[in-house]
Image (cartoon, rainbow, N blue to C red):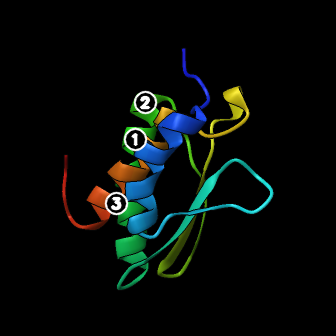
């Protein structure tokens, strides 16, 4: 069962994400990042790759796409805030954006 991140765990898990452009969402226990791509096809292709992992892990992002920009918010609705799944998916998104297939 997934649990909400403890205050102690947050420091360790979230700090590297903040260094890669993720930020806390004001008024919510969630993180957000804007991804920019070269064009719509690149943005949509990345979303497709992320969707496969999101489905595999049964953890789905809140996101929107306009042309080459993808806005992403991650939170775990089942626990009412951030969980290890959010950090895991954020790291995967960052890796896939850089071309990695971890």
Q: Residue at x 41, y 71 (%)?
A: 43
How far is mark 2 from mark 3, CA to CA? 16 Å
Classify residue 72 as left or right of residue 41. Answer: right
Residue 88, how many percent across, how many down? 40, 41
Q: Position of residue 27 (x, y in %)?
A: 80, 57
Q: Residues within 10 Å of mark 1 (few under 14, many from 20)?
A: few
Which residue appears at 38% of the width and 75% of the height? Answer: 41
Is residue 48 at all visible to an observer of this figure? no
Secondary element at image label 3: helix
Q: Is mark 1 in CB contact (under 8 Å) with mark 3?
A: no
Q: Give how far apart the Cα atoms at labels 1 and 2 are.
A: 10 Å
Q: Residue furthest top?
A: 1
Give the labeled residue for mark 1.
88
x and y percentages locating residue 2 in the rendered image:
55, 21
Q: Residue at x 31, y 65 (%)?
A: 97
Q: Quadrant of the N terminus?
A: top right
Q: Nearer the viewer, residue 11 or 39?
A: 11
Estimate how packed mark 2 is, as few (under 14), some (14 to 19) or many (20 or more) residues with alpha carbons within 10 Å: few
Residue underneath mark 2: 57
Q: Are marks 1 and 2 in contact (CB under 8 Å)?
A: yes
Foreground tag (1 vs 2)? 1
In the drawing, what numbered circle is on residue 94? 3
């Amino acid at each position: 069962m997934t649990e909400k991140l403890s205050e102690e765990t947050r420091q360790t898990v979230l700090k590297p994400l903040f260094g890669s452009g993720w930020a806390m969402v004001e008024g919510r226990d969630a993180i957000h990042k804007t991804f920019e791509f070269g064009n719509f096809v690149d943005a949509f292709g990345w979303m497709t790759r992320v969707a496969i992992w999101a489905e595999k892990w049964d953890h789905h992002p809140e996101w929107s796409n306009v042309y080459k920009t993808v806005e992403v918010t991650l939170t775990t609705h089942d626990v009412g805030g951030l969980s290890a799944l959010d950090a895991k998916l954020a790291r995967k998104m960052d890796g896939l954006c850089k071309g990695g297939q971890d």
